[in-house]
Amino acid sequence: LARVLRKAHVLQAYQRSVTLGTEEYMVPFAFAHMTGDHRADRALRPLNFDLATPTEIYNHGDDWITRIKRLERQGYRPDRSLFALRPPRENDGLRKKAFDEIRGELVAAGFEAPVEEDAARIIEFARIAENPDLKLAR
């Protein structure tokens, strides 16, 4: 993920190894564009789903969905989040089904969820306008 962001010249806009939330509950992200006080408007994190069993895939995905919901209840969910997903390398059917289901749940919950090889989509998400409030004078 860092290599993709660095190559696209957007890494400098992000803090690395960030925890979001309150002292009571914090969630780690690999990269976040911070707005202050453990808050971010955009956050990115790789998630590895190349796991041995479908149950492990479901549990890992459910764990992250729960973490983000708790962060949201506290008012610290980033406006936009991207999880760069590593799918199961061996397609045995059951693990692929579990991965596809978890990926669908992440998307339904409002997250970007490209596979880690989709650099173009990751870069598109990561680009931040330098000053989105700036208006051209007429």
Image: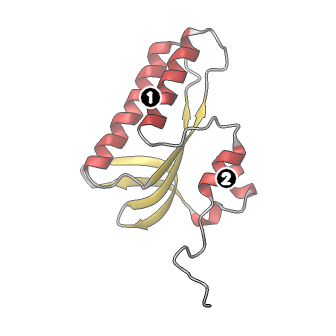
- Is 81 in front, or is 31? 81
How much space separates mark 1 and mark 2, taking CA atoms? 23 Å
- Res. 123 mark: 2
**x and y percent of residue 134 in the render?**
55, 81
Q: Residues within 10 Å of mark 2 (few under 14, many from 20)?
A: some
What is the quadrant of residue 131 in the picture?
bottom right
Residue at the disc numbered 1? 61
Is residue 45 something that shows in the picture? yes
User: Which amino acid type is marked by label 2?
Assistant: Ile
Q: State left or right for residue 107 relative to residue 123.
A: left
Colour scheme in the image?
Answer: secondary structure
Earlier-in-chain disc, 1 versus 2: 1
Secondary structure state at the residue bearing disc 1: helix
- Res. 94 mark: none
**x and y percent of residue 92 in the render?**
62, 8
Q: Residue at x 44, y 21 (%)?
A: 58
